[in-house]
Image (tube, rainbow, N blue to C red):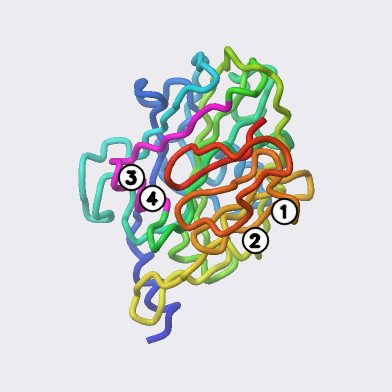
Amino acid sequence: MKSSTIVHLLGVARAHTIMQSFNGNPQGAGIYMPSDDSFISDVNSNSIACNGPPVTSFRSSSQVFEVKAGSQVTGAWLHTLSSTGPDSTADNKVIDSSHKGPISVWMKKVSDATQNPSAGPGGGWFRIAEEGLNNGKWGVDTLIASGGIHKATIPTCIEDGNYLLRFELIALHSAYDQGGAQFYMECAQIRVTGGTGTGKPATVSLPGAYKATDPGIKVMIYNNDGQPYPSSYTIPGNGSSGSGSSGSSGGSSGSGGSASGQTLYGQCGGNGWTGPTTCASGTCKKSNDYYSQCLP
């Protein structure tokens, strides 16, 4: 049986997902959030920033949550807004476990976070956390094991002010065909306080940071036996737009940086990381077992 046939069978179930709660607040508080758990597949669409058409049934929020620089934030994912466990289209309450791929968290400074999603498209985005493939374990596997809780730490060095905080999951079970990768994202509305303002992260544009042919987007992750087989994976979106790089990550073949060390805000360590471990600027600081970052 061909790999594409096996992956197709894995992807038949409508096992989608929604990032539906921020920092333990009620569903939809401070989020531009749909009740539709569908995905975005067009990386050139404005919807790749903070979601939108063809996903439907959105509701906006006027709430902006204050977040201290250096504090941990969480997004909570569910297969549907009422998921409590496995159902006919997913083997758990978060997303079907066949939908493996990377997870990440991004930020963009904006003048008014309530202008979500219209403030999302365009430049200014920088990544603050990511997990790809580490020793055979995908970011989605970690997310499922945590019951859908997606964590990141707000950098201490950024400026105070309004930000969009973007939680993203890319499901790769059907990514063997161009346009087959499934992007899920929601943007939370926050106001950062207590930042030093000393850091100026390199940024990318959404849309723009992703290309449909990027090796982390068009990729076969299942073998002929229907088992995940890649030994390495590079998370997409790290400066492919040409507007700057926040570093690169992914399992046992990390890349990014230069001969003199990783760029500021790039990844510089973590379980399975084989890319640069020194920083051209700043200091390599550990966030967790899977992610260390060059920070001022």
The residue at which mark 2 appears reads as: 212
Say which label, 4 or 3, has the lower sequence index.
Answer: 4
Across and down, in percent, residue 33 comes to: 46, 31
Q: Tell me which corner region of the image, top left, top right, bottom left or bottom right, holds residue 163.
A: top right
- Amino acid type at circle 4 is His
The residue at which mark 3 appears reads as: 79
Say which label, 3 or 2, has the lower sequence index.
Answer: 3
* Labelled pair 3, 2 in contact (Cβ < 8 Å): no
Q: Residues within 10 Å of mark 4 (few under 14, many from 20)?
A: many
- Range of the magenta residues? 139-155
Across and down, in percent, residue 81 comes to: 32, 36
Residue closest to the eye, 57 or 49: 49
For residue 98, side relative to residue 272 (left or right): left
Q: Quadrant of the C terminus?
A: top right
The alpha-carbon separation of the residues under discs 2 and 1 comes to 11 Å
Query: Could you say which disc has been placed on residue 16 in the image?
Result: 4
The residue at which mark 1 appears reads as: 240
Q: Residues within 10 Å of mark 3 (few under 14, many from 20)?
A: many
- Amino acid type at circle 1 is Ser
